[in-house]
Amino acid sequence: MVPPTEAPATAPARRTPARKGKKRGEGQWALGYREPLNPNERSKKDDNPLNVRQRIETIYAHGGFDSIDPADLRGRFRWWGLYTQRAPGIPGARTGTIEPEDLDDRYFMMRIRIDGGAMTTEQLRVVGEIAQTYARDTADITDRQNVQLHWVRVEDVPTIWEKLESVGLYTTEACGDCPRVLLGSPVAGIAADEIIDATPAIKEISERYIGDRSLSNLPRKFKTAISGSPRWDTVPEINDVSLVGVVHPEHGPGFDVWVGGGLSTNPKLAVRLGAWVPLEEAAEVWLGVVQIFRDYGYRRLRNRARLKFLVNDWGAEKFRQVLEDEYLGRKLIDGPAPETPAARDHIGVHKQNDGNFYVGVKSQAGRVTGSTLVEVAKAAERVGSSRVRTTVEQNLLVLDVAESDVDGLVGDLGKLGLQADPSPWRRSVMACTGIEFCKLAIVETKQRAIDLINELEERLADIQGDVDNPVTVNLNGCPNACARTQVADIGLKGQMVPDGEGNQVEGFQVHLGGGLGLDAGFGRKIRGHKVTSAELGDYVERLVRRYLAQRDEGERFAQWVARAEEDDLK
């Protein structure tokens, strides 16, 4: 990881400003539009956000919450993985209607960056101990392989950093307009069906470019996925850049390059550049894509500042040409498309390529505790394992388990609420942080998801064996789709909805039949259909029973939704 004290590099000015009479600039540096165009851009120009660490360590940790400059608090803190929590007691109906300072609690969410989802048991134990001591024992596994803590005081942040960094973990650029965590296959290097081990590329990028000041001011966040697994276990379709394992008929294993994916209010699937990249060039190509975003990305309007908008306007052919001509200085090799997979997750017991086994267990919608993480580390070490992994489904894997120890480990993890053989409903539920801590949320999600799991296991016990393709249910507290609601079988977007008596209560807009892989596409909105949070169990039960009753042989939920009558989806 690049030390945060390195001198900044200036982005190259590649072209002269547009002449008068031309279309208004989008804030693209490479076209000469370098003036601050909104408060976020002005803040980043005024001071590189990475500089805020020194102020946290020397000023804010000593002066406390009230000593924090507002520009740092609601802006630059993010580059070090820190957001203020939502103040308790503010109802979802007031989200977006009150001033930021009225939403701020005096505590922070801290996001721990876990590139590739890879941790040692020592690292996992330290994260758990930090959660116990400084975060009221909170810990959430995110769908981007990070761990998030809550109730963190600014006074404790330097000590937490010291403890994390002593075992090789960081919060550097875990949030902010910068290259965020690098998603990687949780079974990189051990899976029997792996095309190529992407670990060296993830390590090279992390060590060379995370904390690099020439990349710390991007138009907005930048999401990366690099995996050599044929399961596409890093959701490559919805990242800004994805390197997807594929075998070239002449050159062998390498990566297919995809760009421009993303969800939120303008969802787009990534597009292939048609280029094949060998492992030793992966970091260079990644850097070129990031630099294109930095130099050509739209900065004028915050809601158009993601790479997907540039890719949509340019198209794959122009994007590849700019990458080759202006950033790589050479042509890329044309390559084949990878085969689309049907399955992604790694839940259960699976054989490794060395004869040992890995055990994948399901969390409750990502919600764990620091104490649980400490006990997972102990359980893994009792069977001789020193490696654990997080996944994009908010789950945990323990690697390198001897066959004779598998049953004992599965039992120990099960006692912690982490199941290796979960029901279809437990296996497939995902939830964002929700109104409990998030300032953008409108409804509660984590506990609602956990309660929904329990409801569905009871309500649908009679048909559990009939669900051969788990139906994914994703709950999100706002429109930003952090829990990937738009690509779920049943995606639930939080909002206030009327109940039977006309009162505004917590509820969800329904998206049905979204998916990735074989069912890549965004969910179908049912005209005017919304469900209150209280009605959720009834609704999901009704929907699943109709699917099982009406489906053709082998038909997946998303396929059924695409042809179902609208009344059957209500």
Image: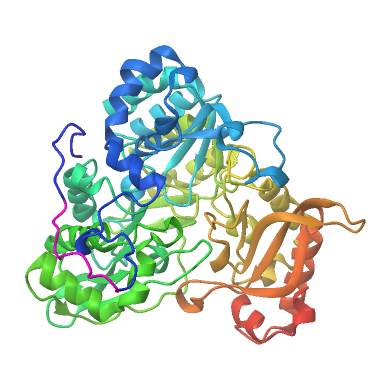
Classify 240 as above or below 389: below
Image vertical order of residue 473 relative to residue 312, above or below? above
Q: What kind of secondary structure does the magenta stretch mostly adopt?
A: loop
Residue 309, image x and y in percent?
Answer: 38, 68
Residue at x-position 57% and y-position 72%? 514
Instruction: Specify start and end residues of the magenta stretch as a single range.
Output: 11-21
Taking the image as shown, residue 111 lies to the left or right of residue 466, namely left
> How is the structure coloured here?
rainbow
Report x, y in % for residue 151.
54, 27
Choose between 545 and 383: the one closer to the eye.
545
Q: Residue lying farthest left?
A: 329
Which quarter of the image is occupied by the C terminus? bottom right
Between 529 and 451, the residue placed more toward the observer is: 529
The residue lying at 59 percent from left, 59 percent from top is 428
Quadrant showing the N terminus: top left
Please tell me whether residue 19 belongs to the stretch shown in magenta. yes
Relative image position of residue 379 (x, y in whole percent): 45, 34
Snapshot quadrant of residue 369: top right
| Vertical position of residue 567 compared to residue 197: above or below | below
On the image, the x and y values in percent for residue 502 come to 89, 56
